[in-house]
Structure formats: structure tokens, C-alpha cells
Amino acid sequence: IILRNENDANPCEGHVEVYYDNEMGYVGDKNWNEKTDEVVCKSTHCGRPVGNSNVYRSYSRPVWLNELDCKGNEESLWDCDGWPGPSVSFYRKPTVKKVKCSLDNISFHLEQHKCEGAVKYTIQSDKKETGYICNEGFGADDATRLCKSIPGCGETGKIVTSQWMRTEGFMSSQQGAFKKINCSGIQNVKHLWQCIESHPSKCILPAAVSCTDIDKVKVLLTDDSDRETKCYGYVKIQKTQKNDKKSHVCGDDWTEKESEMVCKELNCGKVIKELKTINGKNGIMNHVKCTGSESSLWYCRAEHRSQKCTSAPYVVCQGSREVRLQDGPGKCAGRLEVKDEGQWKRVSKENWDGSYTKHACKQLDCGDDGKDKSDSDEFSQGTGEMLTFRCQQSDKNLADCTATNTNNQNRNEKAVQLICNGEIIVKIIMTLTDTCWGMVNISTGNETGYVSGAHWSDTLSKELCKELGCGTEILKPIKKPGTSDGIKFKSLFKMKNSINMRQYSIVKMEMNPESTKNQDSKKPAYVVCKGSIKPRFNDKDNQRHKCSGNVEVSYEGQWLPVSKKTLDNKETQNTICTELQCG
């Protein structure tokens, strides 16, 4: 049963309508009296009757009830005697009764925040009455109707079912302070009170609503220059619909709970650092108290007004820390750097252990482990600030660990250098400039150049000679190559799953002042394979005999004589004759 007034949203004044057989219809006024008015006002929770009048009705809609004989103590018009049955009594009159009840100032509001919270009602009469709407039967359409009725809370709303809506006020309310909303079948609802019903007991949860267009505010973090940052900085609020300036959230009563709320709302992981700074800036929110279940910091209990802050919270969330490997062949090898509050910083070798390497490689999506190459100096040390990490057993990646800035006065402090076992291998082609001897040359398909000799080893030389079919031994070079601007690669190293040198991983040269200072890095790797040595007979006086004469060998492109002492060895003689196919 509702009171409907086409020209007014007052739910306690209007002609009477009842819902039957999935359709709203009128109530005829045959036998109508003051007792009928009393039942109408009681059943609509509108107080006492003040008066009634006649209003015209539409003939296209049914008259469900008529000939009512109410005593005044009934809970509903359906409980009154006299009516023969729904739409049975023939009703010709063009008018029906319009009833005015005593309550005329009924409003709904949300408890925790203007546009989000538990649904409460307030009745302003001789005695103010407040209470809660139970969540039973409260639907999405009801949430939207409620948001529309609250100025500044938008056109849509959604239901919230969080335990934090069970506030102290809700828990301490008496049984009579609970009501239920049931708008089922009621068309063109103008006021939620038209759908009000009594609730027989104390409800478990209040109806709770979050208006989706709420104030159109944005919670964000900024640096000292008021630039929005990723997951670190001063906590601020911006009203986006007006393109307002960012305003501080003040720090009075601020705790880690509120910092956790900020990191959660911004999808930035857990809090890794928080502090409060002295601040005389303009604020819009203060004395914030969050339970942790709110959908936004803006909805936490707080003082919402423009004011001067005496302090401001500064929050650093886990998501502000990024990890990368620099000066390597790819993302999975190189010098470790961590982005800390917007700045890339090197990581100190101090306190570093194998478990930290696992954290870094996993965070980089580069496998589940790696090698610490900090002592090999395969990658450059780089420049800039350093961080020292301390991780607990429960930490899953470096973003979880505690990081402190290292004193940069220690110039000998080394940076962490890693090769993760998930490093992507570049297929490479390696050659020597003169087949089996010369400078080491690498081609990656996109780039060709020499390899620096600074990190080259005899082991690599022997491996290269073997793969080039130039023997398994190396010889001492006679020539000493000078510096070259054609060096493109700093070093190469064997990976865990490398089958041959074509699958080794390479490190490109850094083109910066630090790398060019080292002259050793500008000298190319140089290899002489034993297979490059070729003998011949050289006898100008007896050129017709190809299998006799003075013996010479080709060594690094030069024909050099062989000492007599060497040729006194019978095995050496046999080797020369066999190689020259002279028996």
C-alpha cells in the first residue's frame, strides 16, 4: 500500500494505491471514514491522519479494493472487513480519496560518508526518529534511487556487503529502529519511503550503498613538485569533475592503517615505508580513520573540509619498486638496479646472498635462480646512488625487502651483477679475421664487430679454435693488435643451456665516458689457433723438387724459417713430409 502524489514526492500524502496480481490499482471510497485514514497512515509508516480530500482517478486502471469497513486497529487495508474481493465491487465514481498523514519530512542518508555507507532514515516530527534499513530485499534499483535522492552523489549506486558497515550505532540500536525496503511491483517510485515495511526483528546487516559517481574524486600520490607518481609520495585528493587542483590529506591521527588503505586503493601492494612531514599546505581531509574494508580513502571516517595541514602523510608502496639489469645482453643479465621513489639506484654487494639473487631473477621473470657475477667485473659498475637490501625468509621479491641508502663515500663498494638462468640466448656467429687466427669477430645478424680483449680468456680461445676446425690448441701471438674503434662487444659467457658458442650470451660495449677511459677494453681479443700453422719448402736453387728444401711455416700471415734444432727431431720431419704429401 502506498500514497502517490503525481506532483509531489512526499511519501505521506496522496491517493491510495494497492498492489495486487502484479498491478497497482486504486482503493474506492465507499464506506470510507476516519478509521480508514488511520489504517492508511499506519500501514505506510506515515504517522497519524491529518485529513483527506477527493482527487480524480484514471479509468484505465482497476479499483482493487472498495466497501472497506476498517476499525482502525488493522495493520493493512487488506485486513479490514467488508470488501467482497479484489475488483469485485463495481466502482463508478471518478474520484478516490487523497490522504494526508502527519509525517512530512522523511529523508535517507548514508552513515559513514555522504555518498557511501550504511543506509539510515530520519523522520523529523515532534520527536526526531532515526534508524537503519536492513539489507534483506534491498536491491540494486533501490541503491540507485537512493543515490539519486542525495545531492552530489550521482545517478547510480551499487550495494556494499562489508562487515565494517555494522557500526557501533547499528549494533546498539533497539529493535524498533530497523525497517525494510520492498519496492517489488511498485511502479514509478518517487521516494523510497513508499516501499517501507516493518522489520520484525533486529537485522544482521544494514543495507549499504556506494554511489558510483561519488564526488568524482581521485586519490593519488605526488612528489615534491606536485607531479603524480607511481605508488609513492604525498597523499592527495583531486576532484576530477571540476579539474580541481590537488589538495593534501592532512596527517593528524594518521596511522599505518590509512597508509595500507592508500596502497590498496591504488593497486600498489603493501606499505614499505611511511612518514609524516611538517606541512603548511592546503588540505581537504583530516583525522582520517579507516577500517580497511572501504573502497576508497575518501570514504573513511574523516573531517572533510578545506583547512591548513600541520602535517602530511608520505607513503611508499611496494609497487613503486621496479627492478632491471643494465649493461647486459638482455633483460636477464647485467648490473642490478632498483627504482626507489622514482630514481634508479644500484644495489650494493654488501649483505647480498644467493637467496636475494633468486628474488631478483623471479621478479624479472628471468627464471628461478641465477649467478652472482659481482666479482668478475663483466659488466660496468655504473654510477649513482646505491641501496643495501636486507630480506626476510617470508619476502617473495626485492620489493618486499628492506632497503637503505648506502654511504657513497666508499668508492670501492661493488654493485651487484647477475646472470639469471632465464637469460635469452642470442644466436651468434663467431669468426677470426684470417680463418684460424686474428681478431675475434661477432655477428648477431643486426650488428657486427670485434670483441674486447679485457675479459677474453684462453679457455674461450681454445673453444673457438675447436669450433672453427682450427685445432684444439692455441699459440702465443707474435703480433700485438692495437686499439680499435670497431669493438662492439664487451664480453661473452656460456649460459647453463648453451650447447656451443653460437648460443653464448653477449654483453655489448657501453658507449659512455666511463667505458672509454679503460684502454684495455679498446684492444680486441686476438687468437692464434695451432691449426693456422702451414709448412712449405722454399729452395730457390732447386725449385723442381717440391719435396725438399728449406722449411718455412706460415705464422700470423708471415712465412718464417724453422730452426735447425727443431728439424733435427725425426718426428717433426715426418709430420712436415706427411702434411706436404711428400711421403
Image (spheres, helix red, strand yellow):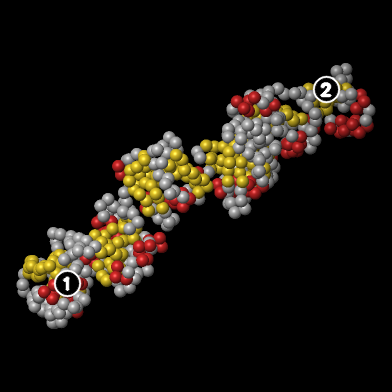
Q: Among all residues in the image, which is located at the extreme top?
A: 541
Q: Which label is found at residue 481?
A: none
Determine the secondary structure under disc 2. strand
Say if residue 87 shows up in the picture. Answer: no
Say if residue 179 shows up in the picture. Answer: yes
Q: In the rendered structure, which disc, 2 or 1, sits on the residue that comes first in sequence? A: 1
- Please name which of the two marks, 2 or 1, marks the residue nearer to the observer: 1
Question: Is disc 1 surrounded by few (<14), some (14 to 19) or many (20+) residues within 10 Å?
Answer: many
* Amino acid on which the number 1 mark rests in the picture: Val
Percent of width and height locating residue 145: 26, 59
Residue at horizontal 73 percent and vertical 29 percent from the top: 526
Where is residue 28, by image quadrant? bottom left
Percent of width and height locating residue 560: 83, 22
* Amino acid on which the number 2 mark rests in the picture: Leu
Percent of width and height locating residue 194: 21, 66
- The residue indicated by pointer 2 is 560
Residue at horizontal 22 percent and vertical 64 percent from the top: 127
Q: Which label is found at residue 40?
A: 1
Where is residue 173, by image quadrant? bottom left
Question: On the rendered structure, is 471 left or right of 490?
Answer: right
Residue at horizontal 74 percent and vertical 30 percent from the top: 527
Residue at horizontal 93 percent and vertical 30 percent from the top: 569
What's the CA distance linking mark 2 and mark 1? 124 Å
